Amino acid sequence: MLLGLVDSYFVGQLGLDELAALGFTLPVISSAHGIALGIGMALSVLISRMLGAGNIDQAARTISDGRYLTIVVAIIMQLLLWLFFEPLFKVLGASAEVMPHIRDYMFIWLPSIPLMFLNITGNTVLRAAGSPAKSAFLLFMVALLNGIFDPIFIFGFGPIPGMGMIGASLATVLAWMITYAISVFMLGYQEKLLVRTLPSWSSLLESWRKLMRIGVPAVCANLMTPAAAGVLTAMMAGFGTSAVAGFGVAIRVEAVCLMIAFALSSTLPMFIGQNLGAGKIERVRRALYGSLGFVLIFQTLVYLGLRVLPAIGPLFSEVESVVAIINDYLLLVPLTYSGHAVVILVMVSLNAMNKPRIALAVTTLRLALINLPLAYVGAQFYGTLGLFVGYALGNIISGILAFVIMRRVWRRDVGVLATHI
């Protein structure tokens, strides 16, 4: 989350078009993250139950097979983005003035997709294996290294020339490369969860089949959010370059505001999986409902904190129209982050309970049938302010519906959760 925010801060100093270009890349980058997190979710659900049942060798084999699948999926996405690069960003509303800056950034970022996928799934595996501190260290290193490299490569330092948007992308890629090397050491040598021997073809396909049964719905659910971000970006593009630039910054600030909810979403599924594997249903219930209650309170405190702090917009741009978009969004939408956080936790918990299709339905319901239609209607009547009000109202409605669905699933299936793997 901090990585994206730091990028926005330094790129914003380059100019309006560059900041807008970074905003246009957000849906694509978020889609890549969503796919990797979906694969990571499938891995975490399977191996957390294996580890909870004491099947360590089987867990290591599944992790190794999952990394092969991760590489294959990453290469496919890479090729598709190369093939449909221009049409994709034109659909998102990128203008001729902004497109060169998008190319500069994506030219470096695209080849790094497999590396990023392995980093994200590797971090998920570390959490599922009961080593969240190591995962946190790796993610902290990514943010720290990116923050160090950004000003060096964007503006130049000593013999290193300033490279603008190329430098921003290069900083991120180098940060991922360094942390990848550390993660391989942690997984392979410290945790001993990577198998060096190649699997048989039949064994590999069986592992992939199990992963895809959970992973495909999880990926689809994760892709709903960046797809919605793409639609919202296209809507904002109708209000001009400044609107896209401001919206891109606001979304990255939003990610930081939801950081604790995302942290819970990355650990709660593993906790649920391990305790289901051990047959400890009551611990699962307490963790699930306790987490939902916590985010309701915490996100309310986050909103109050935003109201106390000075306006954030001027930190990222000197353009008044950009600042106005950032401040309007952060005035309205964070008030409803509690509903958003509930949806996040319900979705990942349903995946951990082997209910990936219901998890997909929850996400689809929130974005495709509630948030986006309300945002569109609001935009037609009241412009960007109406769009934000509609989107915020959707967060409240979808949060309530997600909780109702979660409670119904729990009451109906609690008796079979511990044995249904």
Image (spheres, rainbow, N blue to C red):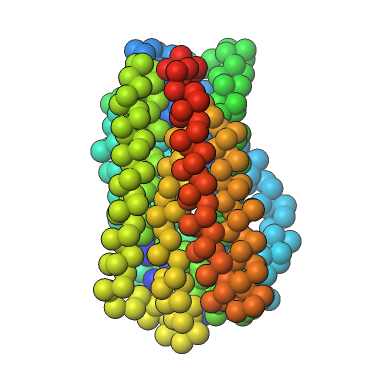
Residue 149: percent from left, percent from top:
35, 61
Q: Residue at x 54, y 29 (%)?
A: 355
- Where 221 sits versus 273, above or below? below
Q: Residue at x 48, y 57 (%)?
A: 396
Does residue 208 appear in the picture of this structure?
no
Q: Nearer the viewer, residue 282 or 30?
A: 282
Left or right, residue 116 beside residue 96: left
Residue 109: percent from left, percent from top:
53, 55
- Where 251 sits versus 318, above or below? above
Q: Nearer the viewer, residue 193 or 111?
A: 193
Left or right, residue 349 beside residue 308: right
- Where 258 sits versus 347, above or below? below
Task: State the quadrant of the N terminus.
Answer: bottom left
Q: Residue at x 54, y 77 (%)?
A: 385
Residue 273: percent from left, percent from top:
40, 25
Q: Nearer the viewer, residue 181 or 61?
A: 61
